[in-house]
Image: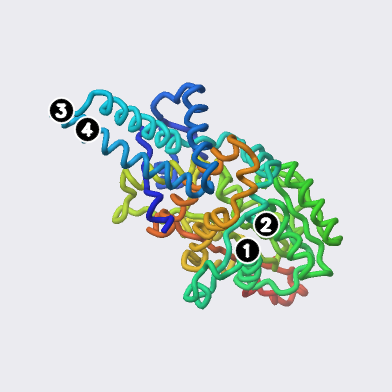
Amino acid sequence: MLGRALQEFGPSVSYRSQPVPAYAPASSRLAARRLRGAPVAALSDIAASSEAVATSSRSSSAAHSAREVYQLSESAVSTSASSAAHGAAGIDPTVLAAVAGLGLTAFTIKRILDTPSRTYDNNVGQEYDAWTEEGVLEYYWGEHIHLGYYSDEELARGYLKKDFKQAKFDFVDEMLGFSGAKAPQKILDVGCGFGGTSRHLAKKFRDASVTGITLSPKQVARGTELAQQQGVTNVKFQVMDALAMDIPDDTYDLVWACESGEHMPDKKKYVEEMTRVLKPGGTLVIACWCQREETPAAPFSPADKADLQFLYDEWAHPYFISIEEFGRLMNGTGKLQAVTTANWNQNTLASWRHSIWVGVFDPWIVISKGPRIWYKTVREIVTIERMHQAFATGLMEYGMMTGTKSLPSAKPADSASDARVPTTIGV
């Protein structure tokens, strides 16, 4: 089983301070502290290690390369230590040197893979531009860059029997059902990626107009191209910052945000902006990777903090918050009611390892891209497995949040009447 082969390795690093939005709760501030790694390897060392990984990929899939690297690291380092301890007992010095060299090489590769490479630095748009241009993410994940949904029955049959890309369409339908929205006329998709969800909603609600926003110009171009190819005319895509949307108040009756909050450096502003552009009576629905709620009774351990820090820094996340904190932020707007939250770990967890297996079954696009993509893919596999472990152990949770914007109070019908339109509406 691939999961057994890819082991958890916490980065061997210490904390360094990093600005975090003033709004962030104490638990998020603590977890969001940056780490100071040992000096980064010289470029020549990284290139050599990359070529070592690339060589492994020539004879196996990228997923197997990651497994071999980690197994090699464990066995070689262990063997090297054992040999050193018994060196005086008559082991040939040449053999001892070779084993020590192998262990050092494996340790170097492991250290590189454990050192985050894409720490958040207002670089989210750039990273998604790169992923879009490479084409590997779209090839395997399809039009939707988010986790899929697996029903209890499908999980009982085995998640590998489900089409990986179809699971993402199913997720969109399940998220729509969770929101309670029925027939929205104006839809905003915040953090739309390639626009898969925007197009799916546009096809489902033919009379609606759908707008997708992202920080990535290349995603806008690709989303527009796919909409034209599919004949979807009621959708458009724009480059726009979700924290400063150039959109009037009360514009959309469904604001949709699927796995975009992870990249937001100010979660409070994120919720407030989406609430601002939402029409009274309209629905806000959010899906987001969340870290568990930290409490005095259940604090994060040093290992928890190290694991979270790796996940922040490898995929350009400033920090995560809990499902409970999202609920507090939504209620804190003073404009959302009937706020509902849920943890969808059970029905989304399979996506992580499923995404690895689709690469194992069909590795050729990665193989054809050359050493740089081989190395990057190995890094992605290691991170995906670490994501799986974090969600499987409960350190991370898959948060679902929805709420309805309150209707404004009406003016009195006349001076003799104090009758008013109800100020709330149910989901």
Which quadrant would the N terminus be assigned to in this image? bottom left
Does 376 appear above or below 142? above
Foreground tag (2 vs 4)? 4
Pick the residue in front: 156 or 37.
Answer: 156
Q: Residue at x 71, y 55 (%)?
A: 277
Report how far apart the C-alphas of labels 3 and 1 lie in the structure. 59 Å
Instruction: Give the residue pinned by disc 4.
Output: 83
What amino acid is labelled 4 in the image?
Ser
Report how far apart the C-alphas of labels 2 and 4 lie in the structure. 48 Å
Instruction: Give the residue pinned by disc 2.
Output: 142
Foreground tag (3 vs 2)? 3
What amino acid is labelled 2 in the image?
Gly
Tell which circle, 1 or 4, labels the residue nearer the N-terminal end: 4
Tell which circle, 3 or 1, labels the residue nearer the N-terminal end: 3
Tell which circle, 4 or 3, labels the residue nearer the N-terminal end: 4
Residue 312, percent from left and from top: 49, 43
Does 260 appear above or below 168? above
Foreground tag (2 vs 1)? 2
Crowdedness near tag 2: few (<14), some (14–19) or many (≥20) residues, C-alpha within 10 Å: some
Residue 80, percent from left and from top: 27, 33
User: Disc count in the image?
Assistant: 4
Instruction: Give the residue pinned by disc 3.
Output: 90
- Using the rendered view, name the quadrant where residue 166 is placed: bottom right
Which quadrant would the C terminus be assigned to in this image? bottom right
Does 84 appear above or below 182? above
Helix or strand or loop: what does disc 4 sit on?
A: helix
The answer to the question of whether label 2 and label 1 lie on touching residues, with beta carbons closer than 8 A, is yes
Report how far apart the C-alphas of labels 1 and 4 lie in the structure. 50 Å
Instruction: Give the residue pinned by disc 1.
Output: 168
Report how far apart the C-alphas of labels 2 and 1 lie in the structure. 9 Å
Tell which circle, 2 or 1, labels the residue nearer the N-terminal end: 2
Tell which circle, 2 or 4, labels the residue nearer the N-terminal end: 4
